[in-house]
Structure formats: structure tokens, C-alpha cells
Image (tube, rainbow, N blue to C red):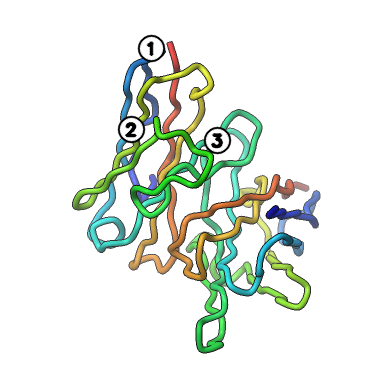
Amino acid sequence: QSVLTQPPSVSGAPGQRVTISCTGSSSNIGAGYNVHWYQQLPRTAPKLLIYDNTNRPSGVPDRFSGSKSGTSASLAITGLQAEDEADYYCQSYDTSLSGSVFGGGTKLTVL
Amino acid sequence: EVELLESGGGLVQPGGSLRLSCAASGFTFSNYAMTWVRQAPGKGLEWVSGITGSGDSGSGERTFYADSVKGRFSISRDNSKNTIYLQMNSLRAEDTAVYHCAKGTNRYISSGLGHWGQGTLVTVSS
């Protein structure tokens, strides 16, 4: 069981908006550590989507956005496209573990 | 352009050892945290180990490990060769995975991982 909890799967139709939650605790997200989000397409290395809670690396469409509140964070994807179908992971640092941790991952299906 | 190239994976028996390498290029290597992340077949990402970048005052790097590998794995970096290493000892079947190295967005271990290598497969089996 991951220290950061994500829903195993979410789905949405093309053009819709979906959100993926990442629930942590007072030793990671709630302690003020930043949350980062990754997209992993099948058979490829993960790609950084959002860093430091809300920032998009260059080249990432503004359809992707991140937020953080308390012990949780969320990734929102608007204008859903077929190519968004992938696995999504959140990541943060955990002070109790003295290391970084990933969420269990969420599989996004575009209907 | 940032490039990360892992090597050293392969088949090893339980209890054996392996050393992974990750050669980096395209950025000022010493300034950035570097991390190993693994992914077992059909499973999610697992953070394995990380090493900080050099501090502003030239302070030494710090190393961090997941509980699952603490005492068995050792991470190091050679800034003169732009390379990080992962020495893996007492390997177990559950260490079987693709191992990716990744570059942090800054020198801290809590940073996001902005660039990833394609990974090297480690298989622990008799």
C-alpha cells in the first residue's frame, strides 16, 4: 500500500474534464513538501507533467494543471484527448521515511 | 539536450550483486539531484534511492534510500564522469524490475524528476 493514495482508475469522454486525487499525510504533502505529477504512456519512461504542485515544464499543454490543499493534491486534465490515455503518478517527499514516494498510479481511460 | 543512459542490468541469482551506471550529458551534472526509480513488470513506480546535488557552499552530497533497499543498495556519483551508480547487493526476486535513473529539477531530493532514462532491466532469478 502506497503512502500516497490515488484512485486506481478514472475515465472520461473526449473533451471532458477529469481529476486525479493524491492523498497523503502530515509527514509528506501535509508537511509542506511539493507534489509532482508524471504521465507514463505504454512502454515508455515516465514524463514530468507538473512539478512543485502547480508548475508545468515547457512543452506540457495547459490542459494539465495541478493543485494542492492540506494533505492532498490533484491533477486536472481538461479537453480530454485520446492520447491522454496513460498511467498517472503523483510523487512527494516523506519526512518519516526520509525519502521520496510515489502514489500507486491511476490509469486514465478515454472512452 | 539532457540525456541519461543506464547500463549494467542483467540476470543475477538471488543473493548476488550488480552495479548499475547512469551516464548523463547536456547539463551541469554536479548541480542536480539524481535518483533511481524502478518499475516491476506490470506494477507502478517505486522510488529506490537518491543523491543530492552539490550545495552552494560546496557541501557534500547526501544519500537517501527506500526502506525496501536500505542496507543492501548504495548510491554514489562521480561528478568528474557525469555518472551515478547503484551498487545492489543481496539481491532478491522482488528486486526484479526496470531501473530508471532520473534527473531532479534542482539539487534537492524532494525535487521533481524532469528527465528520465529509458531504463535497464534487472532480473533476479535462479
Decide: is B81 above or below B120: below
Q: Tell me what residue is drawn at x 43 percent, y 10 percent.
A: A111
Q: CA distance from mark 3 to mark 1?
A: 20 Å
Q: Tell me what residue is drawn at x 38 percent, y 15 percent.
A: A15
Q: Which residue is mark 3?
A: A40
Decide which of tag 3 and tag 1 comes sooner along the chain: 1
Q: Is residue B97 something that shows in the picture?
A: yes
Residue A70 locus on image (x, y percent): 19, 52
Q: Which residue is mark 1?
A: A13
Mark 1 neighbour density, 10 Å: few (under 14) some (14–19) many (20 or more): some
Q: Is residue A23 left or right of residue B32?
A: left
Q: Tell me what residue is drawn at x 44 percent, y 41 percent.
A: A89
| Label number found at residue A76 | 2
Assess whether mark 1 and mark 2 are in contact (beta carbons under 8 angstroms).
no
Outermost residue, left side: A70
The chain letter for the residue carrying disc 2 is A
Residue type, numbered disc 1 = Ala
The chain letter for the residue carrying disc 3 is A
Q: CA distance from mark 2 to mark 3?
A: 16 Å
Decide: is B102 above or below A16: below
The chain letter for the residue carrying disc 1 is A
Residue type, numbered disc 2 = Ala
Q: Is residue A62 left or right of residue B19?
A: left
